[in-house]
């Protein structure tokens, strides 16, 4: 049961008084506060086998090995720390305490705000733990962005979220959604954000990490989450580091031939840009929370997974975000990469972007939003629309007289460009009509979607297709395989 009002000190004290829980802490960089909170709570001798801080890089490398990337605040470093510390616990204490103890290893690697306040403050935190003595271990790993403007406040926030993580692993493990919700106890998104979470292990075999990512965005813990075609969650700043990013937004319910044509030809045109390195391009399909809400009841998680499974089967990287306005999405992406960003949009999207009413809350109105949206390295690639039997492109795009010069300025300065290579036969396809045909069991929709999409829909009864099958999401299949491999190596 979720205890919303329990404080950080009470959480640490409860763990300290629970004689089953025993483990070690390894905190490198700026994140040396979690263990301190357990010491201050009292009774820490019942919890802490060891606490250490390998602050010096040479010491850290000698203990955990050298990172190929040369970076220290990365997930691979955190995993090495968890593996090293947990194996030491088992090696040294399994015989003495193993039958009566659930071991854990908590680790973090963090960079906080520097003296000049010029860096990106972030970190990785993880807990490897048992729920029962002598059982297999589980991992819960998170990545956080620290937003406080003072170093000491960032360290305090790290200590709080570290205690929340360990407490959640032991007391909310049976309800992963509750565990996620509890991570921000005594904190606010204005202080710290969680932009990635991953559950692994035998006790989390049925947990879909993509749904956990959705909960992060839905609860306001972050504005965007990312995962790959294999169903694995990704940390955005690492996955998009030094990448050219191309994004297509849509409901994608389901992906149709026209949308795949948009992605494929938009990607081809983006790679041909003179300032784009084709080997550094990542293409993403974006689902907004607004587009995920099917009705007033909110987000249908099964429907969400249906869409993601289809996109994953097509080899797409998927982003879910809370950025309704395009300029906010661009501002987010520009923080992750300094390279060029492309947006694939249809004519209806372009009409939305140029609707001044969407920017009335900004002091500078539409011009303020465009200053971000059309920044130095951003470009819109516009896919044509079929209207009343005629093809509608940027040449036919109509705007009020007050906005027409602005549009022409952007076109002439290479900020907006038509996608010129497209399949005219696809323009008649309506996603809503395809969905209606699927749900009614009508024939003919298969020709409007890629073959692989049709196979996935029929095999897994996606989007209300009338059939009966035991549905196992792709992400869950991957995790079950990982658990089996982990158990086989023990």
Image (cartoon, grey):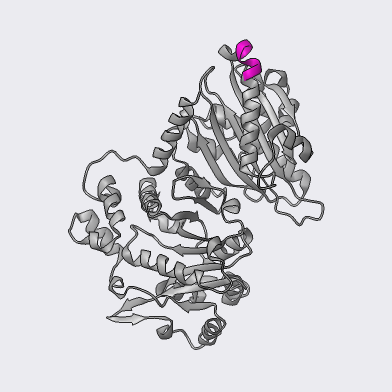
- Residue at 63% over, 11% down: 96
Can I make out residue 7 in this image? Answer: no
As displayed, is residue 126 above or below residue 149? above
Q: Position of residue 452 (x, y in %)?
A: 30, 54
Q: Position of residue 322 (x, y in %)?
A: 51, 57
58 relative position to 423: left or right: right
Which is nearer the eye, 391 or 483?
483
Q: Position of residue 235 (x, y in %)?
A: 57, 48
Q: Tell me the quarter of the picture where residue 3 sits.
A: top right
Segment colored magenta: 91-97
As displayed, is residue 91 above or below residue 112? above
Which is nearer the eye, 104 or 317?
317
Q: Position of residue 450 (x, y in %)?
A: 30, 59
Q: Tell me the quarter of the picture where residue 274 sits.
A: bottom right
- Residue at 68% over, 25% down: 24
As displayed, is residue 98 above or below residue 440? above
Residue at the right extreme, as displayed? 115
Can I make out residue 478 in this image? Answer: yes
478 relative position to 119: left or right: left
As displayed, is residue 442 above or below residue 47? below
* Number of marks present in the image shown: 0
- Residue at 64% over, 15% down: 93
Residue at the left extreme, as displayed? 443
- Residue at 61% over, 19% down: 90
Answer whether residue 20 is magenta in the image. Answer: no
Which is nearer the eye, 200 or 115?
200
Answer whether residue 95 is magenta in the image. Answer: yes
Chief SS of the magenta region: helix
């Amino acid at each position: 049961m979720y205890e919303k009002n329990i404080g950080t000190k009470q959480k640490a004290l409860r763990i300290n008084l629970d004689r089953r829980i025993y483990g070690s802490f390894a905190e490198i960089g700026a994140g040396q506060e979690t263990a301190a909170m357990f010491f201050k709570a009292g009774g820490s001798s019942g919890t802490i086998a060891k606490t250490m801080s390998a602050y010096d890089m040479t010491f850290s490398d000698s203990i955990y090995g050298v990172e190929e990337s040369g970076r220290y605040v990365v997930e691979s470093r955190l995993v090495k720390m968890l593996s090293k510390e947990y194996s030491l616990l088992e090696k040294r204490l399994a015989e003495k305490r193993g039958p009566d103890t659930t071991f854990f290893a908590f680790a973090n690697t963090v960079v906080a705000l520097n003296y000049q306040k010029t860096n990106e403050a972030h970190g990785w935190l993880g807990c490897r733990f048992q729920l029962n003595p002598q059982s297999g271990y589980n991992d819960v790993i998170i990545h956080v962005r620290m937003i406080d403007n003072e170093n000491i406040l960032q360290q305090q926030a790290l200590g709080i979220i570290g205690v929340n993580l360990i407490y959640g692993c032991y007391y909310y493990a049976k309800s992963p959604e509750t565990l996620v919700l509890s991570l921000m106890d005594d904190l606010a998104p204005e202080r710290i954000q969680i932009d990635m979470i991953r559950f692994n292990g035998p006790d989390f075999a049925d947990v879909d990490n993509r749904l956990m990512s959705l909960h992060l965005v839905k609860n306001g813990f972050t504005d965007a989450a990312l995962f790959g075609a294999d169903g694995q969650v990704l940390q955005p700043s690492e996955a998009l580091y030094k990448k050219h990013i191309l994004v297509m937004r849509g409901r994608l319910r389901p992906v149709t031939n026209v949308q795949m044509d948009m992605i494929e030809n938009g990607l081809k045109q983006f790679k041909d840009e003179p300032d784009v390195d084709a080997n550094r391009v990542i293409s993403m399909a974006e689902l907004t929370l607004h587009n995920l809400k099917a009705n007033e009841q909110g987000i249908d998680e099964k429907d969400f997974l249906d869409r993601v499974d289809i996109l994953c089967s097509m080899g797409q990287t998927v982003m879910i975000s809370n950025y309704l306005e395009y300029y906010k999405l661009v501002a987010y992406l520009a923080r992750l990469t300094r390279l060029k960003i492309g947006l694939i949009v249809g004519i209806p999207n372009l009409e939305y972007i140029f609707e001044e009413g969407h920017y009335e809350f900004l002091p500078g109105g539409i011009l303020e939003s465009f200053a971000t949206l059309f920044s130095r390295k951003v470009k819109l690639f516009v896919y044509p629309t079929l209207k009343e039997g005629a093809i509608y492109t940027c040449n036919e795009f109509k705007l009020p007289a007050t906005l027409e010069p602005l549009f022409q300025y952007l076109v002439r300065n290479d900020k907006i460009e038509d996608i010129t290579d497209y399949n005219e036969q696809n323009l008649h396809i309506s996603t809503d009509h395809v969905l209606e045909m699927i749900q009614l069991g009508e024939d003919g929709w298969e020709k409007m979607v890629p073959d692989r999409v049709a196979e996935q829909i029929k095999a897994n009864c996606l989007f209300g297709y009338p059939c009966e099958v035991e549905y196992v999401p792709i992400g869950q299949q991957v995790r079950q395989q990982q658990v089996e491999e982990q158990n086989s190596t023990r």
